[in-house]
């Protein structure tokens, strides 16, 4: 979690920012409930795969062990993911540790160049994404991540 902007993500939820929400407590995760993913239009197929991969312990562990080339350059500088592996780390960390009831996968969707307004085929997305992820992870030095 070092340098991925944890100060921003794990800061207290400011109740003054919830202007259009009837009860801000509805936006907080309750107990051990799972964190959800916001549907950005036609992104339910992406959210389904993200949840599926997150709940696979071997995939989640490999993603957590992934290292980007710019990771850890400066502790004071907020890290921003620049690869699929980095975006998955950020999403998986938030799915596991966020205090919010749901998070937005907007940065991940943008990184992949997907149009949230267009419905895509889930099987084609899965094949394409796994191919991109394999390319990203195959460059890692840790064999547990690479394989």
Image: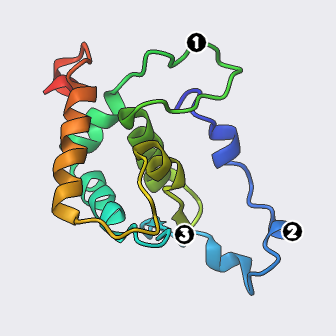
Q: CA distance from mark 3 to mark 1?
A: 31 Å
Circle 1 SS class: loop
Closest to the camera, between mark 3 and mark 1, is 1
Decide which of tag 1 and tag 2 comes sooner along the chain: 2
Decide which of tag 3 and tag 1 comes sooner along the chain: 1
Q: Are marks 3 and 1 in contact (CB under 8 Å)?
A: no
Q: Position of residue 8 (x, y in %)?
A: 69, 44
Residue that badge 3 annotates: 101
Q: Quadrant of the C terminus?
A: top left
Q: Nearer the viewer, residue 30 or 130?
A: 130
Taking the spot 19% from the left edge, 33% from the top edge, the residue there is 134
Q: In the rendered picture of this protein, how many numbered marks are placed on residues?
A: 3
Q: Nearer the viewer, residue 21 or 45?
A: 45
Decide which of tag 3 and tag 2 comes sooner along the chain: 2
127 left or right, relative to 31? left
Circle 2 SS class: helix
Q: Nearer the viewer, residue 13 or 45?
A: 45
Residue that badge 1 annotates: 73
Label 2 crowding class (10 Å Cα cut-off): few <14, some 14-19, many 20+?
few
Residue that badge 2 annotates: 16
Residue 115: image quadrant is bottom left
Taking the spot 34% from the left edge, 27% from the top edge, the residue there is 66
Label 3 crowding class (10 Å Cα cut-off): few <14, some 14-19, many 20+?
some
Q: Position of residue 130 (x, y in %)?
A: 20, 43
Q: CA distance from mark 1 to mark 2?
A: 34 Å
76 left or right, relative to 39? right
Q: Position of residue 76 (x, y in %)?
A: 71, 20
Residue 59: image quadrant is top left
């Amino acid at each position: 979690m070092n340098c991925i902007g944890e100060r921003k993500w794990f800061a207290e939820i400011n109740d003054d920012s919830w202007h259009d929400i009837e009860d801000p407590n509805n936006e907080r995760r309750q107990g051990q409930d799972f964190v959800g993913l916001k549907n950005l239009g036609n992104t339910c197929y992406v959210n389904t795969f993200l949840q599926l991969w997150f709940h696979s312990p071997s995939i989640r562990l490999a993603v957590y062990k992934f290292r980007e080339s710019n990771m850890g350059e400066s502790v004071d500088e907020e890290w921003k993911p620049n690869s699929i592996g980095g975006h998955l780390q950020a999403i998986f960390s938030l799915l596991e540790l966020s205090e919010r009831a749901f998070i937005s996968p907007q940065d991940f969707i943008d990184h992949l160049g997907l149009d949230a307004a267009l419905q895509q085929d889930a099987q084609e997305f899965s094949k394409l994404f796994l191919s991109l992820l394999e390319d990203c992870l195959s460059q890692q030095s840790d064999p547990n991540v690479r394989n």
